[in-house]
Image (spheres, rainbow, N blue to C red):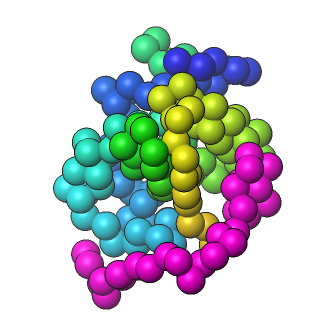
Amino acid sequence: MWINNGFSISTNKDYLDLSLIHNFLSQEAYWSKGIPKQTAKKAIENSPLCFGVYKGEVGTDAFVQVGFARVITDLATFAYLCDVFILPDYRKLGLSKWLIDIITSHSDLKGVRRFMLATNDAHSLYSQYGFEQNVNPELFMQKVLKNPY
């Protein structure tokens, strides 16, 4: 657990507020609108690193989740950062930068050779932590299913 200025970050999935996460992902996030709660739950369960951001200290009586991110990874060579968000009322407090700093310096991700993400609007945030546009995007392929939910 990490603590800073009345906020905490934890990778303990027991503290995650699935309803809050699902609500944001299904209603607010451009990348996952309409995602079923069971799908969000399964994604969290099968991702080895999930980061909850909380107002207050996790594990005490007074903490509430205000952000989230998860990393899909083999913990050896590859990682994909996704579902990153801070609730609107808690933006502009430096929480996104703190979260990305914690994630990119996490000991379980030190040996990862390729750390990827996709973003529509946060390039300036991620570039501060070494992320850059793919030099050879022609090497990458994807299969996107129409309306998978």
Relative to 74, 53 lies left or right: right
- Residue 69 vertical position relative to residue 55 in the rendered view, above or below: below
* Furthest residue in direction top, as rendered: 60
Identify the main secondary structure in magenta.
loop
Q: In the rendered view, does 11 fall on the left or right side of 7?
A: left
Tell me which residue sits at (34%, 38%) in the image. Answer: 48
**In the rendered image, is residue 122 in sight?**
yes
Can residue 55 be seen in the rendering of this structure? no
Give x and y (percent) for residue 3.
Answer: 63, 18
Which residue is depicted at the point 40% across and 72% down? 33
Would residue 22 be counted in the magenta stretch?
no
121 shown above or below 79? below
Residue 115 image position (x, y, % from top left): 55, 51
Q: Quadrant of residue 119?
A: bottom right
Q: Is 60 located above or below residue 125 in the figure?
A: above
- Residue 16 falls in which quadrant of the image? top left
Q: Which residues are magenta?
A: 122-149
Percent coordinates x, y for residue 108 in the rendering? 48, 29
Q: Position of residue 14 (x, y in %)?
A: 31, 26
Foreground residue among 75 and 92: 75
Q: Residue at point 76% right, 56% down?
A: 127
Frontmost residue, 104 versus 20: 104
- At horizontal 31% and vertical 87% (from top left) the residue drawn is 146
Magenta region includes residue 144:
yes
Q: Quadrant of the C terminus?
A: bottom left
Q: How many marks?
A: 0
| Residue 66 location, quadrant | top right
- Between residue 109 and residue 92, name the one nearer to us: 109
